[in-house]
Image (cartoon, rainbow, N blue to C red):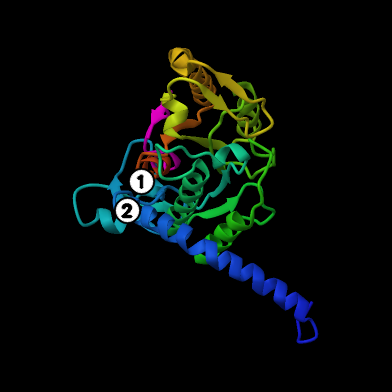
Amino acid sequence: MVLGRSQPGVWTSYREQAETIAASLPPLLVEAERVAATVAQGVHGRRKVGVGETFWEYRHHRAQDPMTAIDWRQSAKSDNLYVRENEWEAAESVWIWRDNSPSMRYGSEFASVTKLDRATVLSLACASLLIRGGERIARLEANDPPAAGKSALRRYAADLVNETTSGQSLPSLIPLPRFAQVVMISDFLTPAADIEIVMRFYASGGIKGHLVQILDPAEEDLPFEGRARFEGMEGESDLTFDRIEALRDQYRGRLHEHRSAIAAAAQRLGWSFMTHRTDKPPQTALLALYASLSGEIANTTWNRV
């Protein structure tokens, strides 16, 4: 359809949408690009040695290498035999999901941002860092195929800004290309068994995943004293306690059990699981996530970042 002067209402709608995105997007992108730029100084790209057309390096010939792999021109320059290795074009697709459920809008006086703010910045920064490395990214809940370049980042950011509040605390089960990777950023306060169902669905398709749990410091420490009333943000009943400090140890124990169950499921599937508090710098979480995506760190039971 060609939009002409005879459609002022359509133009007005597009302009209003653009102005809304423009008003919200710059702060998100500026913060995300700043975080990504800081981390980019300390990491290398995700390219690896393997099949490809771009020269990577020469290495000494090994007994298991076929004779056809020897680079005779380079070997003639010394007494050693050398094999020419090319670069593996590792432009795998990375699908990113950011939890947009009501519970993510929580933020206490102990942190300067909400969980949703931090999850948005981390997902944008992760996308920016991957695109800098030549990767293709996509939003897990979107219908658009993975793409690379600055235009892909702008589209991804616009999708996040336009996304309406979702009642889902876990991503949908969507078939993905084999050997893709998924990044899920959430508070992951839903039952561990439900989270494992999502992980197993994607892992059964050869997908490797990375879970980043984001919590407010108040959700970890339960620092309140005296009478406290907790309001359910996703349909749960409100709860009131007269001496909340009496439940602190029990609460922390339950949270630890919940996290341990998620971490154990992730480890069984070869996935990574890390936890991040909103009162900590986002750079630490992004660095650990990128290293996990690159396979530079081994999967651990539970990585605090």
Q: Is mark 2 on a helix, strand or loop?
A: helix
Looking at marks 1 and 2 on the same chain, the residue that comes earlier in the sequence is marked by: 2
For residue 42, above or below residue 204: below
Q: Which of 166 and 4 is in front in this view?
A: 166
Which quarter of the image is occupied by the N terminus?
Answer: bottom right
- Residue highlighted by disc 1: 283
Report, in whole angstroms, how far the alpha carbon at label 1 lies from the one at label 2: 7 Å
For residue 283, above or below residue 199: below
Magenta span: helix, strand or loop, mainly?
A: loop
Q: Is residue 99 magenta?
A: no
Q: Which of 108 and 140 is in front in this view?
A: 108
Q: Position of residue 162 (x, y in %)?
A: 63, 57
**Residue placed at 38% from the left, 39% from the top?**
279
Quadrant of residue 225 within the rendered picture: top left
Q: Position of residue 245 (x, y in %)?
A: 43, 17
Classify 10 Å Cα crowding around label 1: few (below 14), some (14-19), many (20 and above).
some
Quadrant of residue 217 within the rendered picture: top left
Question: Given the image, on which type of amino acid does mark 1 rest?
Answer: Gln
Q: Which of 119 and 95 is in front in this view?
A: 119
Q: Position of residue 42 (x, y in %)?
A: 29, 49
- Residue highlighted by disc 2: 38
Q: Where is residue 18 in the image (x, y as percent from the top left)?
A: 61, 70
Question: Given the image, on which type of amino acid does mark 2 rest?
Answer: Thr
- Residue 191 visible in image: no
- Residue 152 visible in image: yes
Q: What element carries label 1?
A: helix
Q: Give the range drawn in magenta.
A: 291-305
**Residue placed at 65% from the left, 44% from the top?**
176
